[in-house]
Image (spheres, helix red, strand yellow):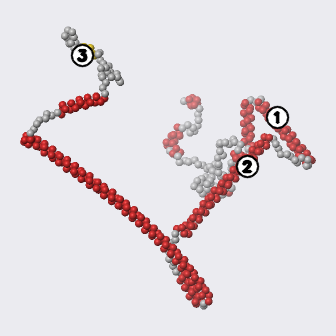
Amino acid sequence: MAARGGVNAKGENAPQPVKVQRYWPGKAPKGVTDYSSSEEEEEEQFERQKETDLITSVQKVEITEQEAASDRRLRRLKEAKEDSTQVIDRRRRHLEDVEKEDIQKDQLHVIEALQEVELDDAAEIRRRQLKRDRALEIRRQEEEGLKALEEEERTQTAQVEEEEEESDSEETSEYETDSEEEEQISRKLLKPVFIPKAHRETVLERERMKELEEETERKRLRELEERKKESHAMVEEHVQKSLQKEVSEDTGLQEIDDTDGLDEQAEYEEWKLRELRRVKRDKEERLAREKERDEIERRRNMSEEQRTKEDMERIKKQREEKPKGQYKFLQKYYHKGSFYMEDDNQILKRDYTVPTPDEVGHKEILPKVMQVKNFGRAGQTKWTHLTDQDTSTKDAPWNAKTEINKRTISKLGGFHGGFDKPTAKKRKS
């Protein structure tokens, strides 16, 4: 509740309670009548016009012509109004003239452009016609030149044949004269004639070579395709044979043996030999199983230390029985490898001590100076081997016989003349 000023019943000023009206969105307040939008707009326009009239209204006063003529301000306003009217008219006329000139210029540009396009088209047509006429003239001249050349060659050939026939019946001097004339004719230079590209031998030869290369490539591709087909056929045949073999093994079908009864005595001997071998093989397998069983039983009755000792002895015996290779004099050493040596691969069981083909057979017969490794190379060694060489050096500072070294050595243990027991030393002291 709000309050406003007022007078109470006693005539004193006192605030009076006023009920505040609450407004809701989308709902018109109480006491407000609905008006159309057009009526509201008319009322607003009327109010604005009224305010404008109040602000801009000027009191109109009647002025006579004599007063207007005598009033300098009115006269000045009138002259300014006339001047502004003249300036506006002059500017408007100037703009109209400029627009007319621009329109005329645009029209002239369009006409000139059309004329230039027409002239360019006509010139292009005339230029093409001249090129076509020139090409036809050149072709006609070439054809005439070819015809003239062929005619000249035929004439020369006929003359040469006639001269050869005449030379047979004439004397030797006349023959020499005719031969000189023939040489002059043969030395006659021919006029160069243009040959079209389609008729040139180089172009034709190039095309033939290109066709030959393409044919060779096609042939190679055909052969490759045929080899692929043959490989596929071989693989398919192999797979079919494998499948047939598996099927025959699964079914247990065997080929019929039709050789029985041909030689009964030989067949009996073969059967007897097979039976003896089978009996011997069975006996050996039985003895091996019994021996293995006895060995297992024996090792089970042994202690862990005894089994370990027996294993080590067996390994030592195997190593001793294994033949060891012997290196030759100054033979190059190659590392034997450390990994995968326990595999049963046959290549790992070869002898690594065998010399390579680059090794010299007997280096002990070489001169003493050549009995070094990599003789004559950048990595040549200085000594044959170090077993008979003293490679120790005495140039170190601690090996020099100086007073400092003597005092240092005298303080080191193990460098004195004798050794006394500590107990004896204490007793002496």
Q: Earlier in the sequence, mark 3 or mark 2?
A: 3
Q: Earlier in the sequence, mark 3 or mark 1?
A: 3
Mark 1 is on which residue type?
A: Glu
Q: Is residue 367 above or below residue 286?
A: below
Distance (Cα) linking label 3 and label 1: 132 Å
| Numbered mark located on residue 290 in the image | 1
Q: Which residue is mark 3?
A: 4
Which x, y percent locates residue 38?
Answer: 29, 30
Residue drawn at 82 percent across, 42 percent down: 253
Which x, y percent locates residue 199?
Answer: 54, 69
Q: Helix or strand or loop: what does disc 3 sit on?
A: strand
| Numbered mark located on residue 237 in the image | 2
Which x, y percent locates residue 103?
Answer: 29, 54
Q: Could you classify mark 3 by the number of other residues whose Cα lies within 10 Å: few (under 14), some (14-19), or many (20 or more)?
A: few
Furthest-top residue in view? 10
Q: Is residue 421 above or below residue 360?
A: above
**Tag 3–tag 1 contact (CB < 8 Å):** no
Q: Which residue is nearer to you in this view: 224 or 401?
A: 224
